[in-house]
Amino acid sequence: MKKNRLFVLLLGTTLLAATVTADASIYSAMNQADVSGNVQGTTNQYGNTAGGLGVRGSLFSNGLFGTAKYRHQFGPVYQGYTGGDSNTFGLKVGYLFAATPFVAVGPYLGYEYNRFSENDAYLHSQASQSLDNLGGGLYAAASLPFANVTGYLGYLGGVSETNHVTGFPPVQYNRSSNLLQMGVNVYYPLVANLDFFVGLHDDDFTQTGAPNLLRGDVGLGASF
């Protein structure tokens, strides 16, 4: 809970600063294509830390916006395995209302698919967990004199969950883990339409057996 309160405080402070000092447009923050590297850690017991790569695109027009992302982590989410990886695909579609000329806030609908895979070369076994989540939340975009900022807070309900271990048939659960997620990206202009950005993101699955993830991103974004 302390981690979640820290994220809410960080996001609120960033948006408050934007309302006071912003003097540019949010369009460059919301019309972006970017690529990033990250370090992600699992905060559950026996959690593992792994690096990864991601791509993301965002479109914004007349208040309507959409984002799509894909991310791959080069390592298992838990310790004790000789290998593994994670793959994530996510979508957000929503509408932003102008709170000021430089700050926009609004609701969104979101979908996310996660697949966590672990393998043990000595036992010749592989295990995987796949989760589908659907829900929504609140999205915000702001422009400061020195940077553009986007942030979100969402809750996605579990739609399906499938677990598979080598040698056994897949097991699909009627009840899947829900997902609480929040994050913030800060974009610093470099040259022309090219931005350098840093981000901090938290994905917490609500049921035992699914990982809770804390991730830091660094990347380049091109606005259009």
Image (tube, grey):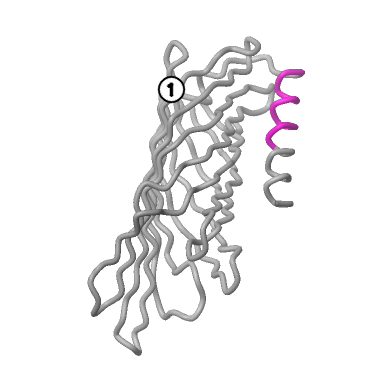
Residue 78 placement, left or right of 24: left
Residue nearer the viewer, 4 or 86? 4
Residue positioned 43% across, 22% down in the render: 65
Residue positioned 30% across, 69% down in the render: 164
Residue positioned most to the bottom: 122
Q: Magenta stretch containing residue 26, yes or no?
A: no
Q: Magenta stretch containing residue 18, yes or no?
A: yes
**Looking at the picture, does residue 44 appear above or below residue 192?**
below
Count how many numbered circles sit on residues in the image. Answer: 1
User: Considering the numbered disc 1 on the image, is that residue within a helix, a strand or a loop?
Assistant: strand
Instruction: Specify the amino acid type for callout 1.
Output: Phe
Using the rendered view, name the quadrant where residue 144 is placed.
top right
Query: Which image quarter is the C terminus in?
Result: top left
- The part of the chain drawn in magenta is 11-20
**Looking at the picture, does residue 3 appear above or below residue 68?**
below
Residue positioned 55% across, 57% down in the render: 213
Q: Residues within 10 Å of mark 1 (few under 14, many from 20)?
A: some
Residue 104's x, y, as percent? Answer: 59, 18
Residue 14 placement, left or right of 140: right
Residue 151's x, y, as percent? Answer: 59, 33
Q: Disc 1 marks which residue? A: 65
Residue positioned 31% across, 81% down in the render: 125
Using the rendered view, name the quadrant where residue 165 is placed.
bottom left
